[in-house]
Image: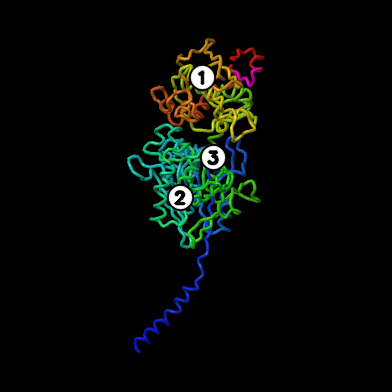
């Protein structure tokens, strides 16, 4: 009887617990809001430094106000940047090279805006490696006042000699919301060695994205206990389908391969393309939709809301909420006062540098028809290159297309600021030995770049329509590829296929950028071809093309928009015949 009474008492004590278990409400799905920027390219403040005009639809200090609005209305917010963050503006260039003792303004903005993660882009490697290391160390440094430490992630950039040790930063971060763990991993395009000089990535081994995910995602899931995994990648969504992640169909862009060939990633934010596209049409290895969001180009904020169901352990996109939100579409958006005030002293110092006079232009240097005929603008760039690196010929590409016609250097005084629209990248020059046939193949490659997907309505394109200064040649565009470059002459004499020339070209081309070296049958970074590099002869600052052009204008004092090049472009056979050119049938 005593045992029975004891058992009944025990059951009566357990019944409330059992009842509670039987009728407990199932855990509700939790929503996670991912907001992202990418490819900001140094646009911190809403200023076009080439003209000093306001640009209210671009810049982190404007985007910061959008971020505040999202954080005020949404819970469980994660803020990331997808790379190509620093390079591209006079502000970030100046403080990289001329004031290294001061905190980097872009890194300060990320810290003030309380980013959860920064992913490196390929343009982060344009500058000397010590500059990038200094930026990473600062952005990841301890909290200080209104500034918060921001982890840098580039999981596929591995320290040489190690299995998977991060070169710098962390491979991923983990955040927790109401017991739900969210892991975010960052990766960069592994194509950086094809664009940069070797000293800019010393000590780094670049891995493809799929094997990187295959290594880290199980760690994030099984060891860290992540319920949701997000990948932030500085790489484009390629068109081709990759079947082997170790040998992707496209080395530069691997976002599709990353999704198609793996499991465990719930969403992807990508940079590099400057895209603002949101899509749900890419499936992972199990056939599950993985939503993908482009991070834009500094003109707004990518927004992606995900729903995690603890009962089924599944993640689904909240489709109606997702997409890119442009600054231009925001009503009454104002610059964030905290960010603007913190960076105002940086801007004041920069303006003094940009206002320094270089010389005088006796006329305007227009970009009209810049890829289709010789122009004073391109002759100016090439003559400046040859002044810095003595050679017979100079190769240069127009870094501004002629679809918006304007004087890149107007008539009158020339301040330093104008050169930041004339030459937008940090490039150095090599002197390279090339044969006549290699020059022909180089230009044949250029003739395939007169149209582009990003601007299909404009013929001329720009960046990849190289020109050769000092050489006469004809572009017969109507002819089959391989027969478009005709009648090459040097100083009035036909160019022999094996005739050797010394040629000035920038490091982007020399290291394989846009495939010109490969098209000419040359090996990128073949240092047996070169005997001069302006990074060595003039230094890492003065040896850059922008500063070479600035020094050329200082030396000349007065520049006139004269055209010396004589090469010709024929769109049709009739054009060639009308001009009296010899037509190859």
Q: In this view, does 55 lie to the left or right of 123?
A: right
| Above or below, comparing residue 1 to residue 525 in the picture | below
What secondary structure is marked by label 2?
Answer: loop
- Which residue is tagged 2? 263
| Of marks 1 and 2, the one in the foreground | 2
Q: Residue lying furthest top in this view?
A: 493
In the image shown, does 465 or 223 lie closer to the viewer?
223
Whether the residues at callouts 1 and 3 have beta carbons within 8 Å, the answer is no
Please state the horizontal and vertical placement of residue 516, each as a whole percent of the image: 49, 26
Whether the residues at callouts 1 and 2 have beta carbons within 8 Å, the answer is no
Whichever of labels 1 and 2 marks the residue nearer the N terminus, that label is: 2
Q: Quarter of the image containing the C terminus?
A: top right
In the image shown, does 146 or 386 lie closer to the viewer?
386
In the image shown, does 135 or 4 lie closer to the viewer?
4
- Which residue is tagged 3? 273
What segment carries the magenta color? 568-573
Residue 569 within the magenta-colored segment of the rendering = yes
Please state the horizontal and vertical placement of residue 401, each as a whole percent of the image: 60, 30
What secondary structure is marked by label 3?
Answer: loop
- Which residue is tagged 1? 440
Q: Residue lying furthest left in this view?
A: 161
Q: Residues within 10 Å of mark 1 (few under 14, many from 20)?
A: many
Residue 560 at least partly seen: no
Residue 160 position by quadrant = top left
Q: Residues within 10 Å of mark 2 (few under 14, many from 20)?
A: some
Residue 450 at least partly seen: yes
Whichever of labels 3 and 2 marks the residue nearer the N terminus, that label is: 2
Q: Quarter of the image containing the N terminus?
A: bottom left
Please state the horizontal and vertical placement of residue 162, each as a whole percent of the image: 33, 43
Q: Distance between the residues labelled 3 and 2?
A: 24 Å
Whichever of labels 1 and 3 marks the residue nearer the N terminus, that label is: 3
| Above or below, comparing residue 561 to residue 352 in the picture | above
């Amino acid at each position: 009887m005593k045992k029975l009474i004891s058992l009944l008492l025990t059951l009566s004590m357990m019944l409330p617990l059992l009842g509670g278990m039987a009728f407990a409400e199932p855990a509700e799905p939790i929503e996670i809001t991912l907001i992202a920027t990418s490819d900001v390219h140094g646009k911190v403040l809403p200023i076009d430094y080439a003209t000093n005009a306001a640009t209210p639809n671009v810049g982190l200090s404007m985007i910061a106000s959008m971020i505040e609005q999202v954080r005020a209305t949404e819970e469980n917010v994660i803020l990331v940047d997808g790379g190509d963050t620093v390079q591209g503006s006079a502000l970030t260039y100046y403080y990289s090279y001329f004031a290294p003792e001061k905190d980097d303004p872009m890194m300060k903005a990320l810290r003030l805006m309380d980013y959860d993660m920064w992913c490196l882009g390929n343009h982060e490697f344009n500058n000397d490696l010590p500059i990038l290391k200094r930026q990473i160390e600062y952005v990841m440094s301890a909290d200080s006042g209104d500034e918060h430490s921001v982890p840098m992630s580039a999981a596929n950039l591995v320290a040489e000699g190690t299995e998977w040790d991060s070169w710098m930063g962390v491979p991923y971060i983990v955040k927790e919301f109401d017991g739900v763990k969210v892991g975010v991993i960052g990766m960069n395009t592994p194509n950086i060695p094809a664009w940069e000089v070797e000293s800019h990535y010393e000590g780094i081994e670049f891995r493809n994205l799929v094997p990187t995910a295959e290594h880290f995602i199980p760690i994030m899931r099984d060891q860290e206990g992540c319920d949701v995994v997000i990948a932030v990648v500085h790489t484009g969504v390629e068109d081709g389908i990759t079947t082997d992640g170790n040998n992707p169909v496209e080395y530069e862009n691997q976002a599709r391969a990353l999704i198609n060939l793996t499991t465990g990633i719930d969403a992807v934010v990508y940079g590099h393309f400057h895209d603002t596209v949101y899509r749900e049409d890419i499936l992972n290895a199990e056939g599950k939709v993985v939503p993908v969001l482009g991070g834009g180009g500094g003109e707004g904020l990518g927004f992606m809301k995900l729903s995690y169901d603890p009962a089924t352990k599944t993640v689904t996109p909240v489709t109606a909420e997702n997409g890119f939100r442009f600054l231009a579409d925001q009503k009454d958006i104002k610059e964030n006062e905290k960010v603007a005030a913190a960076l105002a002293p940086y801007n004041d110092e920069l303006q003094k540098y940009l206002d320094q006079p270089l010389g005088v232009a006796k006329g305007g240097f227009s970009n009209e028809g810049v890829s289709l005929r010789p122009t004073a603008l391109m002759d100016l760039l090439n003559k400046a290159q040859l002044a810095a690196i003595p050679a017979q010929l100079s190769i240069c590409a127009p870094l501004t297309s002629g679809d918006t016609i304007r004087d890149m250097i107007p008539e009158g005084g020339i301040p330093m600021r104008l050169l930041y629209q004339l030459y937008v990248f940090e490039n150095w020059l090599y002197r390279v030995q090339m044969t006549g046939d290699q020059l022909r193949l180089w230009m044949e490659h250029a003739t395939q770049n007169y149209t582009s997907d990003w601007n299909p309505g404009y013929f001329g394109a720009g960046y990849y329509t190289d020109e050769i200064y000092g050489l006469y040649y004809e572009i017969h565009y109507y002819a089959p590829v391989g027969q478009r470059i005709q009648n090459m002459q040097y100083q009035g004499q036909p160019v022999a296929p094996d005739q050797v020339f010394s040629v000035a070209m920038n490091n982007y081309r020399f290291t394989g950028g846009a495939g010109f070296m490969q098209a000419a049958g040359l090996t990128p970074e073949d240092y047996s071809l070169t005997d001069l590099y302006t990074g060595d002869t003039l230094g890492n600052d003065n040896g850059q093309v922008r500063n070479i052009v600035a020094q050329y204008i200082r030396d000349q004092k007065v520049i006139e928009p004269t055209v010396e090049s004589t090469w010709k472009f024929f769109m049709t056979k009739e054009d060639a015949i009308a001009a009296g050119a010899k037509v190859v049938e």
